[in-house]
Amino acid sequence: MALSVDDARLSDLSVGGWLGVGLAVLGIGIVATSAGEWLLSGADPIAGLVGGGFVALIGAALAHDNATPDEEGTCEHCGAHVRVHSSRDTADEAVLVRMSGRPRRISLGPVSVVAQRQTTEHLYCSGECASEDTRAVITSDDHQATAATAEVSQRVE
Ligand SMILES: [Zn+2]
């Protein structure tokens, strides 16, 4: 199916996502019914409009969140498009490297507080690219480097 919003594709929806779509449709139905009754019989439409709109909004948010990829971006080494989605049929793989370096500290007498934390995140299309990228080291001040931990998100059938 080609229908997509912000890269969220209808074909990527799981049961939870379809529940969201169902809620959205139900909410729109409530709004439409309230508006119809208001036009036909003059019944107060506020409760129906607000309630239905709320239900539709929640449903749409659920569906959109469900269809949005878990990780998406550009490989920081080779520039390939990286997209990992747990609802996708193909086995997508990406390497997300999160690092933290030594914090900047301020010492006030006996008290030492962290003034600035050094964290960074890199996304790669594969483990090869992650290890090829020598920029994947935080350098702060002089020569403080950190060990990188790779978190591999992979989908297995
Ligand atoms: Zn790459």
Image (cartoon, rainbow, N blue to C red):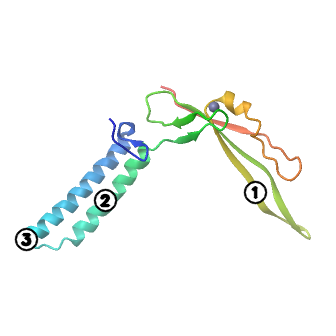
Name the residue at 73% across, 30% down: 132
Which three-letter amino acid code belongs to the residue tagged 2? Val
The residue tagged with tag 2: helix, strand or loop? helix
Which three-letter amino acid code belongs to the residue tagged 3? Ser
In the picture, measured across the screen, residue 132 lies left or right of residue 107, that is left
Please provide percent x and percent y for residue 73.
56, 41
The part of the image, by quadrant, that contains residue 33 is bottom left
Question: How far is disc 2 from disc 3 in space, using C-alphas?
Answer: 24 Å
Name the residue at 31% across, 48% down: 21
Q: Are marks 3 and 1 in contact (CB under 8 Å)?
A: no
Name the residue at 68% across, 30% down: 129
Q: Are marks 2 and 1 in contact (CB under 8 Å)?
A: no
Q: Label 2 neighbourhood size at 10 Å, few (<14), some (14-19), many (20+)?
A: many
In the picture, measured across the screen, residue 42 lies left or right of residue 99, that is left
Dot 3 corresponds to which residue? 41
Which three-letter amino acid code belongs to the residue tagged 1? Arg
Q: Label 1 neighbourhood size at 10 Å, few (<14), some (14-19), many (20+)?
A: few
Please provide percent x and percent y for residue 53.
29, 62
The numbered disc on residue 126 is: none
Q: Earlier in the sequence, mark 3 or mark 1?
A: 3
The residue tagged with tag 3: helix, strand or loop? helix
Question: Is residue 127 positioned above or below 22 on the image?
Answer: above
Dot 1 corresponds to which residue? 117
Q: Residue furthest front?
A: 79
Question: How far is disc 2 from disc 1 in space, using C-alphas?
Answer: 40 Å
| Quadrant containing ligand 1 | top right
Q: Earlier in the sequence, mark 2 or mark 1?
A: 2
